[in-house]
Image (cartoon, grey):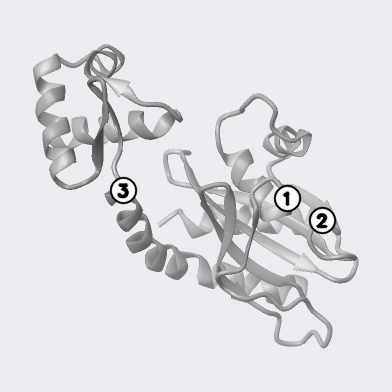
Amino acid sequence: MTLDRGLQVLELLAAEDRDFTVAEIASTLGMHRQAVYRLLATLTAHHLAAPAGSGRYSLGLGILRLSRLAHPQLRRAVLPQLRQLAEALGATAQCVVAEGSEAVTLTVVEPSDEIFHLSQRPGARHPLDQGASGLAILAGRASAAGEPAAVAEARSRGYVVTHGQLTPGAIGIAAPLRDRAGRSLDASISVIALRELDIERAGELVVQAAAAATAA
């Protein structure tokens, strides 16, 4: 169907940090070139694809608007899991999304019965390659040359653990968010504590929360 093929084109344009020719898209997806031209015309009209010169195409800026529209739904999906994590572990729980090369805090839940805990605010930013939440987002993606060693380790273990990377004395534990097909949502769930945690138990709970948040 046309929608399915259009989504395949979008996923291909998003898969690599480069522009694609019509011939490359047609060959990779097993489509006729005329069909690709028609799909690109529709996607371009909605600003989801954009001509990049020399007959090549890239993602359009309209994809950013769709991403922003998806954030409220993601926030609703993760909030119950964040509340459970915060209370179970006595730690601040948060959902973080990728925006370019930065990790941006989407929503935060603080524990209700802990006097000393880390306070975080939505909209806070830090580099993707620093902190448990950003590293977990990278771990949810396909492996890439030059990525931090902690990312490959996280793929094997299922979650990231950091000590004092962004806040001195803080322990961060995070897991990537994936859709039901196992594809990265470029987001993560994490907990941050200013006291010792049972790392294995906390890691299991964070992984379970990430799976539950996107299971519906």
Residue type at the position of mark 3: Leu
User: Which is nearer the N-term, disc 3 or disc 1?
Assistant: 3
Are the residues tagged 2 and 1 within 8 Å (C-beta)?
A: yes
Taking 67 as reference, is 26 above or below it?
above
Mark 3: few, some, or many residues within 10 Å (few <14, many ≥20)?
few
Quarter assignment of residue 96: bottom right
What secondary structure is found at the residue carrying circle 2? loop
Residue type at the position of mark 1: Gln
> On the image, numbered disc 2 is attached to which residue?
165
> On the image, numbered disc 3 is attached to which residue?
61
Q: Decide which of 30, 60 is in the foreground and name it.
A: 60
Mark 2: few, some, or many residues within 10 Å (few <14, many ≥20)?
few
- Residue 177 at x, y = what percent? 54, 50
- Residue 206 at x, y = what percent? 67, 57
Mark 1: few, some, or many residues within 10 Å (few <14, many ≥20)?
some
Q: Decide which of 32, 99 is in the foreground and name it.
A: 99
User: Which is nearer the N-term, disc 2 or disc 1?
Assistant: 1
Q: Which mark is residue 168?
A: none
- Residue 60 at x, y = what percent? 29, 42
Give the residue displayed 12% in from the left and 34% down from the top: 41
What secondary structure is found at the residue carrying circle 1? loop
Give the residue displayed 69% in from the left and 74% down from the top: 86
Quarter assignment of residue 196: bottom right
Dividing the image into 4 quarters, which one contains the C terminus?
bottom left
Residue type at the position of mark 2: Gln
Taking 194 as reference, is 97 above or below it?
above
The answer, for residue 201, to whether it is visible in the render is yes
Give the residue displayed 66% in from the left and 69% down from the top: 93
Q: Which mark is residue 130?
A: 1
Give the label, 2 or 3, closer to the camera.
3
